[in-house]
Image (cartoon, coloured by chain):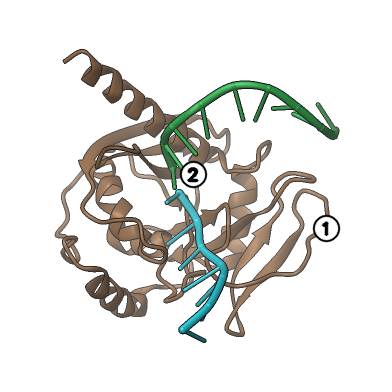
Chain colours: A brown, B cyan, C green
Amino acid sequence: MELSAPMHRWDVTPTEAVALQRELRERVVLEPPPGLRVERVAGADVSTEKGRDTGFGGVVVLDAGTLVPVAQAGSAVTLGFPYVPGLLSFRELPVVAVAWERLSMRPDVLIFDGHGIAHPRRLGIASHGGLLFGIPSIGCAKSLLVGTHGKLADARGSTSPIIHKGEVVGMAVRTRKSVQPVYVSPGHLMDLPTAVELVLRASPKYREPETTRHAHRMVNALRRADGEAAELE
DNA sequence: GCGACAG
DNA sequence: ATCTTGTCGC
């Protein structure tokens, strides 16, 4: 869609990235916009290849009621930052941003594959992305980066707070009976209860939200298609 | 100094 | 995340 002025450079060193996170965390709003109506939910993801430095990104927008895709956009961008625990957004957001700009329709909420404030400096990829795009966002990760939580009941919908340094930074959420929980945390313009509710609503059948499932499938398809095209050179 | 460590 | 085959459980 529209191009917005970048909030900061992406060609930074890990040390500079950490400094940027400490500044950006001050801008995160842990509260949904008054009267937020979620009619469309989107998922973002990035796929990388072993030997190469190209990141394939994608954003898929779903109707929040039916969870049927209504729009999507992809991207292929050269990765300029390595994977460093705690600095994931500096590797993946530049890729997601290109797909985001190509989207013909804006969602009301964006769910990321990774954490929001359940992060060493409370600025995981979901928080950083929410700030960058100026949209309510949620982090939904498959494993913990920081914090601990108590045991959860076996039923779908059971939860247990994620505690980090004495603070509740997220929630372990069982989206499917007898299956490992996902870790939900607010990104930006979002609070924990709303984030948990939206993730559960987006995950009626499988462990991960339909948003990230669709985004994941899309970026993998992009990567394979690119690989096949390269084989015919 | 020793582990832990989203994707 | 990616690389990979089969295998266990509902």
* Residue located 44% across and 74% down the image: A122
- Please state which amino acid type lies under the numbered disc 2: Glu
Which quadrant does the C terminus of chain A fall into? top left
Q: Are marks 1 and 2 on the same chain?
A: yes
Looking at the image, residue A130 sits to the left or right of residue A209; the answer is left
Q: Which of the two discs, 1 and 2, labels the residue nearer the N terminus?
A: 2
Q: Position of residue A107 (x, y in %)?
A: 40, 45
- Please state which amino acid type lies under the numbered disc 1: Ala
Per the image, the residue denoted by label 1 is A153
Chain letter of the residue carrying label 1: A
Give the CA distance from mark 1 to mark 2: 30 Å
Residue A180, compared with residue A63, is above or below; it is below
| Res A51 seen here | yes
1 vs 2, front mark:
1
Q: Position of residue A121 (x, y in %)?
A: 42, 76
* Residue located 42% across and 50% down the image: A108
Mark 2 lies on a secondary structure that is loop
Per the image, the residue denoted by label 2 is A39
Q: Are marks 1 and 2 in contact (CB under 8 Å)?
A: no
Residue A102, compared with residue A24, is above or below; it is above
Q: Position of residue A172 (x, y in %)?
A: 66, 61
Question: Camera-side residue: A67 or A121?
Answer: A121
| Res A33 seen here | no
